[in-house]
Amino acid sequence: MAQIDLNCDFGESFGVYELGNEELLNYVTSVNIACGFHAGDPVVMRKTVQMALEKGTAIGAHPGFPDLLGFGRRNMHVTFEEAYAYVVYQIGALSAFVKAEGGRLSHVKPHGALYNMAAKDAELAEAIAQAVRDVDSSLVLYGLSGSELIRAGRRFGLKTASEVFADRTYQKDGSLTPRNDPRALITDEAEAVQQVLKMVQEGRVRTLEGDDVVIEAETVCIHGDGSQAVSFAKRLVQALHGAMVEIRAIG
């Protein structure tokens, strides 16, 4: 039987600004919690960890660039040492909250621009992978399927999770269509569900050019900031169960 992890970025509120919908915790098996650099603050981090533990959801750190104003989505050119320190710092912060609540950190998934840049930049990917390995070699490293980040994680002896996206379109090289392209997002729920089923069951995805490319799908990212996020998550879970796909956290 095929199996898949469903993950969602979570805890991205900050101060008086509230983002996300906690109802998603009823459908996902893993959450990636913001660690204060692109979003999240200590109170939000603690509350989010508590909610995830209550639901039995696997908890991951979601480190990003130090860019609150840009929500971590702006490219930053940093040194190997800076990237390494940013990731260690953020994993450590979230891990402390998880430990204080009696839980255990399971994985790390970079956020936004850090994630996208590490998909293609081998040196940045190695800085992230080494940071994860040095903090806790049992942590699973999430990265874009077929990316430099997945390759770096494997070189450092980490368990990796190849991630695919339900609502993003793909290029012929297996990369995501850039967000500044009007065709980057899939807005039709039925189309997004069919894309996930194809990736999980066949290990292939249809590109914008109309070709199928091979892709490894171990975890699917569901974006939690859309108005229909919960209804889509429910629909996707029903479709996966109907296709006899087991939904479970990695590790």
Image (cartoon, grey):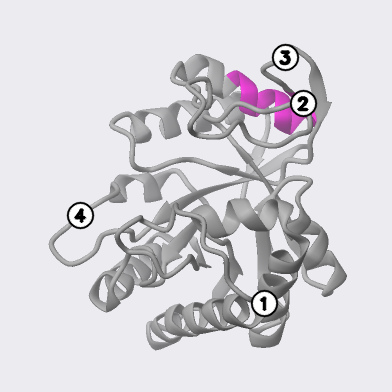
Q: CA distance from mark 2 to mark 3?
A: 7 Å
Mark closest to the chain's N terminus, 3 or 1: 1
Q: Which residue occupies 80% across, 65% down?
A: 152
Q: Which residue is denoted by mark 3 in the rendering?
A: 209
Discs 1/2, front: 1
Q: Amino acid at mark 4?
A: Glu
Per the model, the C-alpha gap separating discs 3 and 1 is 36 Å
| Span colored in magenta | 194-205
Looking at the rendered image, the quarter that the C terminus falls into is bottom right
Whichever of labels 2 and 4 marks the residue nearer the N terminus, that label is 4
Task: Label 2: state its secondary structure.
Answer: loop
Of labels 3 and 4, earlier in sequence is 4
Who comes first in sequence, dot 1 or dot 2? 1
The residue labelled by disc 1 is 80
State if disc 2 and disc 1 touch (CB < 8 Å). Answer: no
Q: Disc 3 vs disc 1: which is toward the camera?
A: 1
SS label for mark 4:
loop
- Disc 2 marks a residue whose amino acid type is Lys
Give 109 or 102, whichever is nearer the viewer.
109
Of tags 2 and 4, which is closer to the observer? 2
Asked if 128 appears above or below 21 in the picture, the reply is: below
Q: Say if 28 sits above or below 161 in the image.
A: above
Image point 23% across, 64% down: which residue? 14
Report the quarter where the N terminus lies.
top right
Residue in front for this viewpoint, 219 or 27: 219
Q: Which mark is residue 172?
A: 2
Predominant SS along the magenta part: helix
